[in-house]
Image (spheres, rainbow, N blue to C red):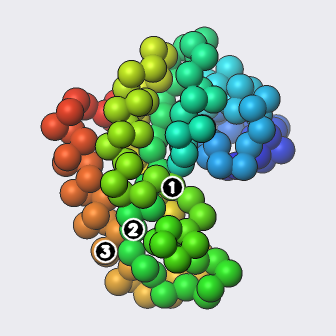
Amino acid sequence: MCTGGELEVALAAGVAPASLGFTATTSRVAELERAVALGVGTIVVDSAIEIERLAPSPPAPTPCSASWSGSSAASTPRPTTSSPRARGQKFGFPLAEAEVAVARIREIPGLEFAGLHCHIGSQIFGVAGFRESASRVLELHAALLEDGPCRS
């Protein structure tokens, strides 16, 4: 989910906060703080600014996943294209910055690197883009594990 409103709907439906993922991309600081205070399962960040929003000592260990944009150029309608950044990609760290972002997450007391996230677009009708993205995310994950484990 991406907004405080979506978070409230999930809570009203009885979903346990620990089973939720909250994407910080469009959230306001107050929404992000509420998600952290509730113990949302994972906060997904896709910019250095979002990591720094989490930096002021979270009240409890906060699992954090880094979203990256090094995924494939999946065949998707132009308005819904999410990758790669060179073509106006909307979300995630460029591949060259992903390791630096994860290192920053690991530096901040109270944050735990929980893994990687990637979004390659919407309305994708073939599997080639998913295959390419999975291959790249596994390579990145292997490189990141050399620097230390992720939570799960």
Query: Which circle's residue, 3 or 1, is located before the other in the chain?
Result: 1
Count of numbered circles on the image:
3
Query: In the image, what residue type sits under mark 1?
Result: Gly
Residue at image mark 2: 71
Query: In the image, what residue type sits under mark 2?
Result: Ser
Between marks 2 and 3, how big is the CA–CA gap? Answer: 7 Å
Tell me the number on the disc at residue 132: 3
Query: Which circle's residue, 1 or 2, is located before the other in the chain?
Result: 2
Q: Is residue 28 above or below residue 62?
A: below
Quadrant where the C terminus sits is top left
Check disc 2: other Cα within 10 Å, few if <14, some if 14-19, many if 20+: many
Asked whether the beta carbons under mark 1 and mark 2 sit within 8 Å of each other, the answer is yes
Query: In the image, what residue type sits under mark 3?
Result: Glu
**Residue 18 appears in the picture as rendered:** no
Query: Which circle's residue, 2 or 3, is located before the other in the chain?
Result: 2
Tell me the number on the disc at residue 92: 1
> Which element is circle 2 on?
loop
| Front residue (pair 16, 24) | 24
- The quarter of the picture where residue 33 lies is top right
Asked whether the beta carbons under mark 2 and mark 3 sit within 8 Å of each other, the answer is yes
Q: Is residue 12 above or below residue 33?
A: below
**Residue 135 appears in the picture as rendered:** yes
Q: Residue at x 75, y 32 (%)?
A: 29
Q: Residue at x 48, y 72 (%)?
A: 86
Between marks 1 and 2, how big is the CA–CA gap? Answer: 10 Å
Q: Is residue 62 above or below residue 141?
A: above
- The x and y percentages for residue 151 are 34, 30
> Which element is circle 3 on?
helix
Query: Horizontally, is 99 left or right of 125 in the view?
Result: left
- The x and y percentages for residue 129 are 39, 79
